């Protein structure tokens, strides 16, 4: 059976972030995806555009790219999910803004990058809040996570999809010297996200935090604007940061959670049946991506060592020196994080 489709403007023509969102682009309202029905098959009528910050093959890319094949195989739904990797549709902030305005349908980023829009997931960014992959899996399946999803969705025009890990624990990298303990950090400049929690964390360790988009970081490191980053091994390697870095310390302060979101109008237009199938497909895809991510964390540490990086694992006494100023953030920039939420999170350990 053939399907008829309404004509639509190409969002590839619409999404021009250099002169679009950032420059005040004004466009007409885009038609949201609907569901074309047949006797035995269904088809999402409009392409769904995803703008991501990961590369093809990365777990955070696969967690979105695999949704369409799962919809087709298990639910007999055809969906054209057009995945644009590596921030080609804009910087982190531009893509987060674009999905809220409907210029793109799906994006994802670490919870810290959403902090300027909502504090619902700030608890997950508290240093040393998430101690392991096992705890992460329990946390995102908990009533607490569902409660915070509701808080987030009540404030923003977004539907939260199942989250994924974003490479495991961040490592503190720099180009200057080995830093076995915080005393060695003094004076080093580190790129951070805009999260006040991360900014204070770097400052408490003795560094100078410099918030900037991840896409600007390589050049900033190469030109000496910053000396280091606090980033997971997969991103350090895949974005070739090892070319401009030398030393890493496994501080294990932040387990990065990648929040995946869809524009609310796009979600609503799918209709109840397709929403149920889409949610199930997204959950399965996220599970596959998390399995990939967890197994690859050690792999990318190995790749970085092979590339000449020196990676240091602190002793128990040295780790205590990292944890103390890290946990002080809970009383500083983290003081306004809902105490009941924090108490519930700790009870899950």
Image (cartoon, rainbow, N blue to C red):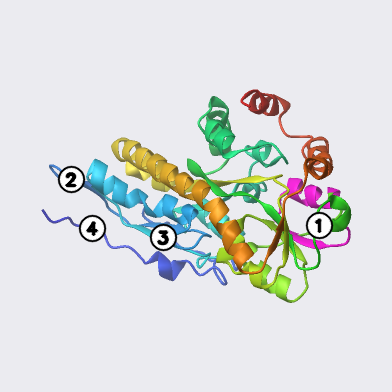
For marks 3 and 2 on the same chain, the one whose residue lies earlier in the sequence: 2
Element under label 1?
loop
Q: Tell me which residue sits at (71%, 51%) in the image.
A: 250
Q: CA distance from mark 1 to mark 3?
A: 38 Å
Q: CA distance from mark 4 to mark 2?
A: 15 Å
Q: Residues within 10 Å of mark 4 (few under 14, many from 20)?
A: few
Disc number lying in front (2 or 1): 1
Disc number lying in front (1 or 3): 1
Residue 41 within the magenta-colored segment of the rendering: no
Q: Tell me which residue sits at (71%, 75%) in the image.
A: 222
Q: CA distance from mark 1 to mark 4?
A: 59 Å
Relative to 303, is 327 on the left or the right?
A: right
Looking at the figure, which quarter contains the C terminus? top right
Horizontal and vertical percent position of residue 195: 71, 49
Q: Are marks 4 and 2 in contact (CB under 8 Å)?
A: no
The magenta stretch is 186-204
> Does residue 119 appear in this view?
no
Q: Nearer the viewer, residue 180 or 154?
A: 180
According to the picture, the residue beneath numbered tag 4 turns out to be 5
For marks 1 and 4 on the same chain, the one whose residue lies earlier in the sequence: 4
Vertical position of residue 16 compared to residue 332: above or below: below
For marks 2 and 1 on the same chain, the one whose residue lies earlier in the sequence: 2
Q: CA distance from mark 3 to mark 2?
A: 23 Å
According to the picture, the residue beneath numbered tag 2 turns out to be 41
Q: Which mark is residue 83?
A: 3
Q: Are marks 3 and 2 in contact (CB under 8 Å)?
A: no
Q: Are marks 1 and 4 in contact (CB under 8 Å)?
A: no
Q: In which quarter of the view is residue 50 placed? A: bottom left
Q: CA distance from mark 4 to mark 3?
A: 21 Å
According to the picture, the residue beneath numbered tag 1 turns out to be 179
Q: Residues within 10 Å of mark 3 (few under 14, many from 20)?
A: some
């Amino acid at each position: 059976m053939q399907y008829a489709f309404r004509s639509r403007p190409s969002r590839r023509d619409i999404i021009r972030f250099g002169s679009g969102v950032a420059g005040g682009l004004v466009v007409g309202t885009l038609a949201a995806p609907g569901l074309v029905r047949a006797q035995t098959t269904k088809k999402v009528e409009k392409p769904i555009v995803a703008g991501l910050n990961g590369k093809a093959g990365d777990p955070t890319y696969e967690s979105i790219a695999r949704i369409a094949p799962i919809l087709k195989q298990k639910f007999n739904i055809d969906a054209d999910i057009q995945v644009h990797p590596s921030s080609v549709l804009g910087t982190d902030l531009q893509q987060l803004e674009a999905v809220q305005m409907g210029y793109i349908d799906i994006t994802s980023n670490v919870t810290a990058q959403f902090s300027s829009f909502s504090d619902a997931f700030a608890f997950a960014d508290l240093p040393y809040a998430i101690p392991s992959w096992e705890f992460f899996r329990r946390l995102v399946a908990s009533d607490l996570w569902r409660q915070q999803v509701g808080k987030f969705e009540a404030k923003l025009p977004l539907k939260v999809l199942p989250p994924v890990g974003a490479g495991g624990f961040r490592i503190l990298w720099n180009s200057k010297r080995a830093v076995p303990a915080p005393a060695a950090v003094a004076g080093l400049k580190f790129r951070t996200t805009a999260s006040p929690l991360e900014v204070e964390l770097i400052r408490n360790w003795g560094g100078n935090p410099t918030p900037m988009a991840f896409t600007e970081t390589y050049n900033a490191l190469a030109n000496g604007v910053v000396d280091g980053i606090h980033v997971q091994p997969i991103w350090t390697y895949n974005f070739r940061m090892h070319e401009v870095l030398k030393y890493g310390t496994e501080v294990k302060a932040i387990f990065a959670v990648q929040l995946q979101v869809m524009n609310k109008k796009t979600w609503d237009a799918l209709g109840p049946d397709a929403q149920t199938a889409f949610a199930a497909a997204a959950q399965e895809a996220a599970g596959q991506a998390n399995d990939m991510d967890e197994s690859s964390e050690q792999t990318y540490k190995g790749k970085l060592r092979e590339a000449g990086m020196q990676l240091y694992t602190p002793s128990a006494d040295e780790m205590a020196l990292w944890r103390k100023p890290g946990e002080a953030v809970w009383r500083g920039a983290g003081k306004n994080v809902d105490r009941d939420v924090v108490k519930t999170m700790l009870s899950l350990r």
